[in-house]
Amino acid sequence: MAARTQPVVVIGAGMGGLVAAALLAARGREVMVLERAVRPGGKIREVTVDGVAVGAGPALLTLRPVFEEIFAAAGADLADHLQLRPQALLGRHAWADGARFDLPVAAAAAAEAIGQFAGAEAARGYRAFRERARRIHDALEGPFLRAQRPGALTLAAQAGMRGLLGASPFATLWDALGEHFPQPRLRQVFARVATYVGSSPLQAPATLMLVAHVELQGLWAVEGGMLRLAEALEALARARGAGFRYGAEVREILVSGGRASAVRLADGETLAAGAVVLNGEAAGLAAGRFGGAASGAVERLPPERRSFSAVTWALHAATEGTAPAAQTVVHADDPTAEYAEIGYRARLPTTPTVTLWAHDRMDGAPPPGGPERLLAMVNAPARADLRPLPEEAIARCGKVAFEQLRRAGFVVHRNPAAEVVTTPAEFDRLFPGAGGALYGPAVHGWQSAFSRPGARTRLPGLYLAGGSAHPGAGVAMAAMSGRLAAARVIEDRG
């Protein structure tokens, strides 16, 4: 009986941990969140550049209904806590030779834009792709995305064998896109959904079309930046009674009687726990980062199964030429070479795809004259713990990336004093355990969905939340993982 009065300890105030804390506290559980950083957010983070806060993580929100459901489950209304602005464009796509088109969210407008860019056949291919992505999403949303992680046979029973096979688990995303988009550049555009979960479209299953459907349902900018979402969830959890301690690094998960029973902090303090929810890299747990007693709770993640890392440049800089959209993508000249270099050769791409987020343009209006807040990103291998990227390679990649932007018409006036560069090594320091991987395990092959750990681990009393756990990476998926973790705790602890 005494164990029931011990708090649920949540390690990490990232998205999954915040959602788990809010929902558990709303159900009357005593909750303590321990976070080694000084503020909530995890991979949703800001850095100070030239005296200005610049978003250096996820920039736009998908699956708004998921967050409305989470706030409602905790007795609150999302609209009372956050202002969300819908985005008209999914992105501005460009190539170094000057080719360019804007992809709207609205289906009819998107088909028209694609038709103008590549012809009537391409527009028909887009409509067929969009319908296929919807079918895949609808087949998997209930029995997989929103459910505790099922095995393949269970999923087949719940979704139906026809529905499961209709989700195209055995074809690669790259090959499946070729059925809809014989034009190489449109194939490039829609293959980007694999990189949203840190994976290569050359190896990812066509099932990932469901990510495209999620995005096609709308994108929202959070007024004030994405970090406001994390702060709103923290405030909600506090209002329901959860406690938070920042600068509290957990070094060890202690085991007693065959279950997780306490945590030990870096300063030696020990806190008893009725249950522990780890919102961190599952790979770090398996590697012993939280002590040997808990390391067997999940399987080890071999380096070759890690998702991508990234190199990012947070800038406060002036732009000229073509105005960037809220999200602008300048595509590589040869996408298959890019993915092969990152995935197979574990090196930075010679000519990368560059994604540029223009934070001050997310309300649809151009910023006033002068510098604006920008984040540029290229994908990178996650091998920082094994083979760190040389500084000269990162500098060379940055030079090529911004030259790619310039050639496509987007000129960014860089100033070393007004930019912050984050490398895979820094991501590994911030989120240790996976060599800088940002999305947990890569989604490569049809079995990958079933190898990602679920909320309940092999160690009783220890649960997982976050992008490295089921259902997957991304802000909304991490939030869903927190909801699943909270449900498991309640189910197991009563």
Image (spheres, grey):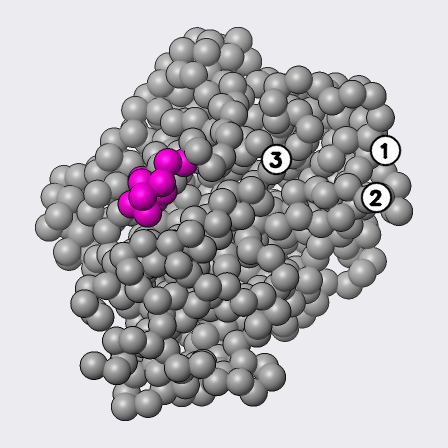
Can you tell which of label 1 and label 2 is closer to the viewer?
2
Residue 151 lies, with reference to residue 297, above or below; the image says: above
Query: Is 70 colored magenta in this rendering?
Result: yes
Question: Farthest residue in the bottom direction?
Answer: 257
The image shows residue 324 at horizontal and vertical percentages of 69, 24
- Residues under labels 1 and 2: Cα distance? 14 Å
The image shows residue 258 at horizontal and vertical percentages of 28, 87
Q: Quadrant of residue 3?
A: bottom left
Label 1 environment density (alpha carbons within 10 Å; few <14, some 14–19, many ≥20): some
Of the numbered discs in the image, which one, if any, rests on residue 224? 3
Can you tell which of label 3 and label 2 is closer to the viewer?
3
Main secondary structure found in the magenta portion: helix
Q: Between residue 284 and residue 223, name the one nearer to us.
A: 223
Instruction: Write down the region rendered in magenta.
Output: 69-78
Q: Amino acid at mark 3?
A: Gly
Q: Amino acid at mark 1?
A: His
Name the element at disc 3.
Answer: loop
Q: Which residue does the image show at 27% across and 66% down from the upper left?
A: 489
Name the element at disc 2.
Answer: loop
Q: Are marks 1 and 2 in contact (CB under 8 Å)?
A: no
Q: Which residue is mark 2?
A: 50
Q: Which residue is mark 1?
A: 413
Q: Quadrant of residue 49?
A: top right
Sequence-first disc among 1 and 2: 2
Q: Between residue 462 and residue 300, name the one nearer to us.
A: 462
Label 3 environment density (alpha carbons within 10 Å; few <14, some 14–19, many ≥20): some
Q: Which residue does the image show at 53% across and 48% down from the upper left?
A: 231
Residue 176 in view in this figure: no
Q: Amino acid at mark 2?
A: Asp
